Image: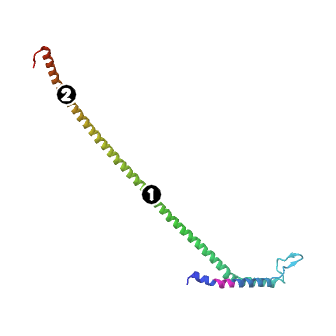
Amino acid sequence: MSKRKRQQDRRPGLHTASLTLHASLLALTLFVAGDAMASEGSIVLLPTKESAPLLISLLVFFILLIWPVNKLLLKPLLGVIDAREDRIVGTRARAEKLAAVADKVLERYESSIREAHEEAQRDRKQALAVARSQSTSQTAEARAGAEQEIEAARAQITGELTQARSTLRTQTEQLATEAASKVLGRNLS
């Protein structure tokens, strides 16, 4: 049987004994106590011969009450206070441990968030660098392609221009010869 269960089993007896003790103490106090001693309208502070037996009986009664009051009232009360203090200390210690654990968990969480943020920044920068590199290479390829097409078009235009000039020369010479033949009236070819 656990200690707590045994204590709960003893409590009804303790409660009855405590009530009995209190009732008997009250009856004894009322029986032994007498009227206050007064002489000439004032209270007597020093015991006299008449009050000595009463004083001795009260001292004996007080000494006899020390053990039951200690056993039935003070020890259980101090035990409850000590147990409560132990529970408070234990609860505070557990709360401090839990706070330390919570701080560690929070620190790990913040650290992982920070690392994830830094990793995302690195990935973003890397993706941006790759995109810029691809954009630059595509732009350079497009320029090179455009310049090749321009050069090919210029070469074609130059070739066509040269061909057109030679065709025009030939035609001009033929026309000039025909015109001279008609003007002169004879064939010049």
Which of the two marks, 1 or 2, is nearer to us in this view? 2
Q: Main secondary structure of the magenta part?
A: helix
The image position of residue 171, as x and y in percent, is: 16, 24
- Residue marked by disc 2: 164
Spatial CA distance of label 1 from label 2 is 74 Å
Q: In this view, does 164 lie to the left or right of 118?
A: left
The disc labelled 2 sits on which kind of residue? Ala
Q: Where on the picture, by quarter, is residue 133?
A: top left
Q: Is mark 2 on a helix, strand or loop?
A: helix
- Rendered-image quadrant of the C terminus: top left
Q: Nearer the viewer, residue 151 or 134?
A: 151
Does 117 appear above or below 39?
Answer: above
- Rendered-image quadrant of the N terminus: bottom right
The image position of residue 145, as x and y in percent, is: 26, 40
Kindly identify the residue that appears in the image at 79 percent across and 83 percent down. Answer: 30
The image position of residue 87, as x and y in percent, is: 58, 73
The disc labelled 1 sits on which kind of residue? Ile
Q: Nearer the viewer, residue 58 or 156?
A: 156
Q: How many labels does the image show?
A: 2
Q: Is residue 147 left or right of residue 48?
A: left
Q: Is residue 86 left or right of residue 170?
A: right
Q: What element carries label 1?
A: helix
- Please rate how many residues cluster around mark 2, counting C-alpha atoms within 10 Å: few if below 14, some from 14 to 19, many from 20: few
- Please rate how many residues cluster around mark 1, counting C-alpha atoms within 10 Å: few if below 14, some from 14 to 19, many from 20: few
Q: Give the range drawn in magenta.
A: 11-17
- Residue marked by disc 1: 113
